[in-house]
Image (cartoon, rainbow, N blue to C red):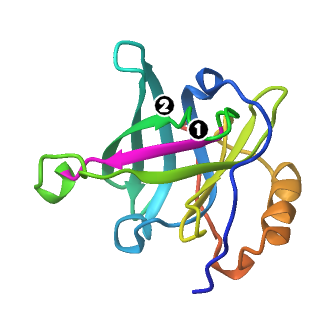
Amino acid sequence: AVMVRVQPASIKIDPRRCMGDWYVQRFIPASKWLEGPAHNGKENYEYDEAKDRVKVTYTFNKGSLDGPVVTTYQRGYVRKDKGGYGTEWAVRPYLGFLGLPFHLPFSLSYYILDIDPADYSFLTCSAPDGSWMYVMTRAQEVDDAFLAPTLAKLSTLGFDMRQIRTMPQKAPSD
């Protein structure tokens, strides 16, 4: 796999406006064995005022749109020492799903590469080396035209478009 070097977006954002639900639309999985069969991927960000950090809960259905739900947890925080844009975060995955009830003793960098600065309707994030990447939207189901500018930008950043997978998403019917 060809890695790319990316930088966090140089646009000032309000990380608190990033709180809430984000639906994974396109991705390069952080863990192929865990996320390979993922459907309905959703990240939820919740700001913990007391600890000045973000609780990240990632859920998805394994294997199909109605497969068993897998839930993973991370602790995140915004790197205030890095330029002040609010686009460089760090996260510590919780390894409880492996039977290891602790957060990693080190943080992984989490860069926001692109975001809609007006309404925060989409967000693209990645590892600094591009080894994993998520394109997420506030709406669970979006069309290809909505994602086209974001995917074009990923291509210009050097991502191998053949590595990017589509996350099957289906909103529950009422």
Q: Which residue is mark 1?
A: 22
Magenta stretch: helix, strand or loop mostly:
strand
Please give the name of the residue rendered at 72% of the width and 29% of the height, measured from the top-left corner.
13
Q: Quadrant of residue 28?
A: bottom right
Would you say residue 88 sits in the magenta stretch?
Answer: yes
Q: Position of residue 126 (x, y in %)?
A: 60, 58
Q: Which residues are magenta?
A: 87-95
Quarter of the image containing the N terminus?
Answer: bottom right
Q: Amino acid at mark 2?
A: Tyr
- 155 relative position to 172: left or right: right
Q: Which residue is mark 2?
A: 45
- Residue extending furthest toward the bottom: 1
In the structure shown, which secondary structural element does the residue marked by tag 2 occupy? Answer: strand
Please give the name of the residue rendered at 46% of the width and 34% of the height, measured from the top-left corner.
77
Please give the name of the residue rendered at 53% of the width and 37% of the height, measured from the top-left corner.
79
Relative depth, front residue between 160 and 174: 160
